[in-house]
Image (tube, rainbow, N blue to C red):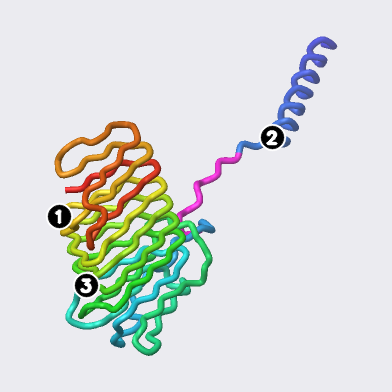
C-alpha cells in the first residue's frame, strides 16, 4: 500500500512539474507584416506641368534627376516623379532655369525626370547634373555645354553650332551629329559612340580601350589616337581615359 501511494505521489509531482514548465515556455508564430504596415511605403508618383512659358535658352543645374529634351510644337516643362520632390522651373527673361533641392535620394523604382519640350532652335543649352542621365531627341542649339558627374548621355539628331560634353562616369551615344565650329566629347570612365557626323577633322584618343574609326579598328585594349585634319574649322574631339571610342 505504501509503495502504491508513493507511485501516485510521484506521478502527481511529475505532472505538476510538466505543467509548470509548459507554462514557462510558449511557441509564438508571428504573421508577416502586410505591405501596408511597412514603414518604407512607396511614395505617390505624379506627372505635373511646371511651366508653359516660351524661352530660347536653357540652364539646368540639378543633383539627382534624369533630363529629357524633346522637339515639340510648343514650349512645356513636365515633371514625373515623387509628389514631394522639390523641383523648380522658372523662365527668367528668355532663359528657362531648372534647379532641385540638392538632396540626393534612393529611388526603388526609377529616378524622377524632367521633360523639356522645345519648339525652336535654342541660343544656348547648359546642363550640370551630379547624378542623372541626359536624353536628347531632335534638338537645334547654338552653344551647348553639358557636365555630368555620373550619368549617360544619348542624343538623336543633334544640331549644334558648337558643343562641349563631358561625363566623369558614363557612356555617350550620339546618332546624327551636325556641328559648325567643332564639338568636344570626353569621359573619364565610359564608352563614346558617334554615328553620322559632318566633322571636317578628327582628334580621337583613348588611354585604355578599343578605337574604331570609319569602320576600321585602330587599336585594341591599349591606347590609341586618330588625328585627321585637326586644323580644320569643324573638328570632332573625343577622349576617354577608360573606355571604347567608335566614330562612323
Vertical placement of 209 versus 50: above or below? Answer: above
Query: Which mark is first along the chain, 1 or 2?
Result: 2
In the image, 146: left or right of 27? left
| Res 223 → quadrant | top left
Q: Nearer the viewer, residue 137 or 44?
A: 137
Query: Which mark is first along the chain, 3 or 2?
Result: 2
Gap between marks 2 and 3 measured at Cα: 76 Å
Mark 2: few/some/many CA within 10 Å (<14, 14-19, 20+):
few
Nearer the observer: mark 2 or 3; the answer is 3
In the image, 177: left or right of 37? left
Instruction: Tell me what residue is drawn at x 17 percent, y 81 percent.
Output: 73
Instruction: Tell me what residue is drawn at x 19 percent, y 57 percent.
Output: 199
Disc 3 secondary structure class? strand
Disc 1 secondary structure class? strand
Q: Which mark is residue 196?
A: 1
Do the residues under discs 2 and 3 have CB atoms within 8 angstroms?
A: no
Q: Name the spot of residue 49 as percent of width and height, x first.
A: 32, 80
Do the residues under discs 2 and 1 have CB atoms within 8 angstroms?
A: no
Q: Name the spot of residue 101 as percent of width and height, x first.
A: 51, 71
Vertical placement of 31 versus 234: above or below? Answer: above
Magenta stretch encompasses residue 160: no
Q: Which mark is residue 161?
A: none
Query: Which mark is first along the chain, 3 or 1?
Result: 3
Q: Which residue corresponds to mark 2?
A: 25
Q: Nearer the viewer, residue 26 or 56?
A: 56
- What is the magenta range? 28-37
Q: Which mark is residue 140?
A: 3
User: How many numbered dots are placed on residues in this image?
Assistant: 3
Mark 1: few/some/many CA within 10 Å (<14, 14-19, 20+):
some
Disc 2 secondary structure class? loop
Q: Name the spot of residue 146 as percent of width and height, x first.
A: 37, 64
Amino acid at each position: 500500500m505504501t509503495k502504491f501511494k508513493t507511485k501516485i505521489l510521484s506521478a502527481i509531482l511529475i505532472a505538476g512539474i510538466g505543467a509548470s514548465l509548459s507554462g514557462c515556455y510558449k511557441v509564438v508564430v508571428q504573421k508577416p507584416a502586410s505591405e501596408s504596415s511597412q514603414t518604407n511605403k512607396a511614395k505617390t508618383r505624379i506627372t505635373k506641368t511646371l511651366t508653359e512659358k516660351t524661352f530660347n535658352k536653357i540652364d539646368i543645374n540639378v543633383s539627382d534627376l534624369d533630363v529629357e529634351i524633346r522637339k515639340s510644337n510648343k514650349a512645356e516643362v513636365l515633371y514625373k516623379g515623387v509628389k514631394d520632390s522639390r523641383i523648380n522651373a522658372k523662365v527668367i527673361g528668355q532663359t528657362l532655369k531648372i534647379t532641385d533641392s540638392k538632396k540626393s535620394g534612393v529611388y526603388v523604382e526609377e529616378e524622377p525626370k524632367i521633360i523639356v519640350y522645345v519648339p525652336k532652335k535654342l541660343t544656348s543649352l547648359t546642363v550640370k547634373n551630379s547624378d542623372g542621365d541626359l536624353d536628347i531627341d531632335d534638338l537645334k542649339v547654338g552653344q551647348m555645354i553639358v557636365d555630368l558627374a555620373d550619368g549617360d548621355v544619348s542624343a538623336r539628331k543633334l544640331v549644334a553650332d558648337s558643343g562641349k560634353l563631358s561625363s566623369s562616369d558614363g557612356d555617350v551615344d550620339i546618332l546624327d551629329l551636325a556641328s559648325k565650329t567643332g564639338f568636344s566629347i570626353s569621359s573619364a570612365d565610359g564608352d563614346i559612340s558617334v554615328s553620322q557626323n559632318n566633322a571636317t577633322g578628327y582628334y580621337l584618343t583613348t588611354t585604355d580601350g578599343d578605337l574604331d574609326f570609319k569602320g576600321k579598328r585602330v587599336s585594341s585594349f591599349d591606347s590609341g589616337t586618330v588625328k585627321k585634319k585637326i586644323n580644320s574649322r569643324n573638328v570632332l574631339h573625343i577622349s576617354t581615359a577608360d573606355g571604347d571610342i567608335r566614330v562612323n
